[in-house]
Image (cartoon, helix red, strand yellow):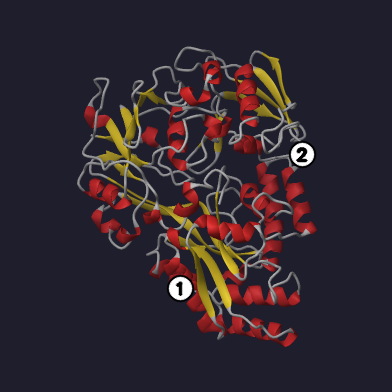
Amino acid sequence: MSRRRWGVGAIALVSAVTLTLTGCSAGGDGDTGGGSNASAIITTNGTEPQNPLVTFGTTETGGGRILTSIYAGLVSYNADGSIQNEVASSIESDDNVVWTITVADGWTFSNGDAITAQTFVDTWTAGAQDVDGAYWFYTIEGASDDGSTAPTGLEVVDDMTFTVTLKAPDADFPLRLGYTAYMPLPSVAFDDLAAFGESPIGNGPYMLEDEGAWRHNEGINLVPNPDYNGVREVANDGLNIVFYTSLESAYADAQGGNLDVLDTVPDTAFATYENDFPERSVNQPAAIYQGFNVPFYLPGFGNDEEGQLRRAAISMAINRDEITETIFQGTRTPATDFTSPVVEGWSDDLPGSEVLEYNPEEAKAKWAEAEAINAYTGPFTLAYNSDGGHQAWVDAVANSISNTLGIEASGLPFPTFAAALDLRTTGTLTGATRAGWQADYPSQGNFLSAQYSTGGSSNYEGYTNPEFDALLTEAASAPSVEDAAGLYEQAQEILMRDLPSVPLWYQNAVGVWGEGVENVVFGWDSVPLYNQVTKG
């Protein structure tokens, strides 16, 4: 999974019902506060943030959606994942290494403090030296990924302009800048980040209703920010995010009219949610990839002819269409690449992608070719964390492989995500392992680099291919995201051949909303665009 969701999200990626939530069930629309028209305050589900609400210190989705609502970054994401300038008036580079960023005039925090170039330099410098934030800034010259050094590649040019010098070219750099870690903090935040994070002061479309707006383990109330003049115009009178103990409770509240928007449907309702909420539901791909990895150090699965044949056979033995329909009731989309349909450059017809199609005869033929090289001594196992709701699909995948290839295949459960991850990080897996990625920002490079490049931060199985690495480097140096897309496609053709990961499906954004609630749009990252939601 992505670095951001390494905690709570690591379990939540595959089975929505297993989300670990804290707090209490909603009892209604809650305290609307501020004298606003209660009918125009939107209620939605959320989770108790793990940390104080600091932009670069938040590493999970519960805090992330709050921060995205109360802060605005240099760019903002449209529903399709494209970006538009927000706090920035321009972001330019001639070489994708040195970026010149001009901050638009007139931006202030809700306490009246002006937002300038120095604001961003101070925020990013602090973030680069924060244990949680360092990851997002280590590509800047002088910064480290553990926060031990301050970046030297940040320089204020004038009141509204600063430059960023990266360690290497990165055509995707502007795409990063809508992510919460890059959003600005007022100077008062640095007096005491933890205290500030309990009642943060932002510059986004919403702000906290009052000092007690964050009711720990219960919810948080947000109201429109009157000083905000950005691209995300607020169409409602506020946003009340309610924290739940179970997703089933949230779903019941949505059915009962006590919750306006629910962004995740429990798997117990997969078969009924469309009838329960007629014409008030969504089921669309999101920037979440799911697959399983087969380490190259396993006997029979090396990065050679035998290994390639076995990986292809395993992949072609899996009936993705049947599993996504039967197990997930159509709330997953069979994968056709290693990224997601919501990012620029995604393709459903990559050369070599036929290896992802269910083809029992071809699977048997490739397995037989591999057997002619060396006999397989199996069994084939697929490790997963049993606290994450994965058993049903793992068993289905294993049965599909076993029935097609005539080998012994089964799931290998571990009690926790951490226990399963330990085997990956120590290189001691005895079979395949569940793997996935939820995008931090809408870029193919975000999916491909960390997981598959040599030395990548999430390349736990140690895949390496110099040709693949060279294409990623070339894509990062491309003049534009569009130019990079073709190079990423070439890189994925290599992955289709080597199969360091066997793509399974994309997790969909599946949500519902109440009667009278309108203008509900789910974004590329599966989060609703709350500022657009209205109700009569």
Counting from the top left corner in percent of width and height, residue 519 is at 34, 39
Residue 53 visible in image? yes
Of the residues tagged 1 and 2, which is closer to the observer?
Answer: 1
Counting from the top left corner in percent of width and height, residue 183 is at 55, 28
Q: Quadrant of residue 126?
A: top right
Q: Circle 2 is placed at which residue position?
A: 168
- Mark 2 surroundings within 10 Å by alpha-carbon count, few (fewer than 14), some (14 through 19), many (20 or more): some
Considering the numbered disc 1 on the image, is that residue within a helix, a strand or a loop?
A: helix
Residue 170 lies left or right of residue 253; in this view the side is right
In the rendered structure, which disc, 1 or 2, sits on the residue that comes first in sequence?
A: 2
Residue 84 visible in image? no
Q: Circles 1 and 2: CB distance less than 8 Å? A: no
Counting from the top left corner in percent of width and height, residue 395 is at 46, 73
- Mark 1 surroundings within 10 Å by alpha-carbon count, few (fewer than 14), some (14 through 19), many (20 or more): many
Give the vertical position of 30 relative to 245 (above or below).
Answer: above
Residue at image position (63%, 27%) is: 124
Residue 143 lies left or right of residue 117; in this view the side is right
Residue at image position (22%, 49%) is: 255
Give the vertical position of 159 relative to 426 (above or below).
Answer: above
Give the vertical position of 55 relative to 343 (above or below).
Answer: above
Counting from the top left corner in percent of width and height, residue 152 is at 75, 26
Q: Nearer the viewer, residue 343 or 400?
A: 400
Real-space Cα separation, disc 1 to disc 2, in angstroms: 43 Å
Q: Circle 1 is placed at which residue position?
A: 396
Considering the numbered disc 2 on the image, is that residue within a helix, a strand or a loop?
A: loop
Q: Nearer the viewer, residue 432 or 42?
A: 432
**Amino acid at circle 1:** Ala
Label annotation for residue 319: none
